[in-house]
Structure formats: C-alpha cells, structure tokens
Image (cartoon, rainbow, N blue to C red):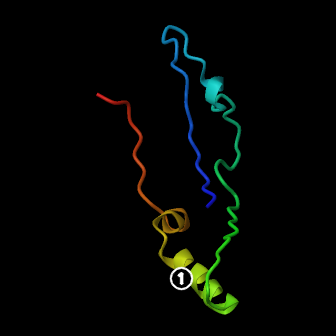
Amino acid sequence: MNHLVCLAKIPPLILPKLCWRRWGIGDLSEKRLGFTDIRAKVNLEGNVSRAELEDLVAHSNLWLPVANTLRNPVNLAVALAE
C-alpha cells in the first residue's frame, strides 16, 4: 500500500534578526497563495467490478475529512504559543 505523507520542518530562527524570506513570505507582492489544484489517483484491488470500485472512490471523495476540509471553508487561527 502506498501512502503520501507531507512533513514540514522549519529550522529554528535566530531571533535578533528575523529573516522572513526564509519561508518565502518576504515577497509581499499581490499573488494567489496556496494550492490551485489537487488531484489523486487511487489504486484499489478487490473481487468486485470496476463500477463498484469507482462507486467506492466517489463515496470516499464525498466523505473524507481531508477532502472536505480542502473543499469547504474552515476557520484557521495561527498564533504565537504562550
């Protein structure tokens, strides 16, 4: 089984001189940030018809929490920890 995992590690900052360009946020010009498209191909095997596998993929697309988080607006709060 194949899994896609995305881990982001940000190295510690040297606080006396913050370098915002380190994360690509130093360029403040007008632009769209984030993803523009996300595509997934699903490899499934089973003793059912291809139509039944396609139905399972369609059902999963409707009910997966990650897919719905990306599809629907969510509240996001980012703050400096106490």
| Residue located 70% across and 43% down the image | 30
Most foreground residue, 82 or 63: 63
| Residue located 55% across and 10% down the image | 17
Q: Which residue is mark 1?
A: 59
| Residue located 54% across and 67% down the image | 67
Say left or right for 70 vs 75. right
Whether 78 is drawn above or below 81: the answer is below
Kindly give the residue lying farthest to the top in the view shown. 16
Whether 40 is drawn above or below 44: the answer is above
Say left or right for 31 vs 73. right
Q: Position of residue 76 (x, y in %)?
A: 42, 50
Whether 21 is drawn above or below 66: the answer is above
Q: Position of residue 6 (x, y in %)?
A: 59, 46
| Quarter of the image where one finds residue 43 | bottom right
Q: Quadrant of the C terminus?
A: top left
Q: Position of residue 1 (x, y in %)?
A: 61, 61
Q: Position of residue 81 (x, y in %)?
A: 33, 30
Whether 40 is drawn above or below 14: the answer is below
Kindly give the residue lying farthest to the front in the view shown. 47
Give the class, few, some or many, for how many residues have Cα within 10 Å of label 1's Cα (few <14, many ≥20).
few
Say left or right for 43 vs 78. right
What's the amino acid at mark 1? His
> How many marks on residues?
1
Most foreground residue, 9 or 31: 9
SS of the residue at dot 1? Answer: helix
| Quarter of the image where one finds residue 61 | bottom right
Most foreground residue, 66 or 23: 66
| Residue located 65% across and 25% down the image | 21
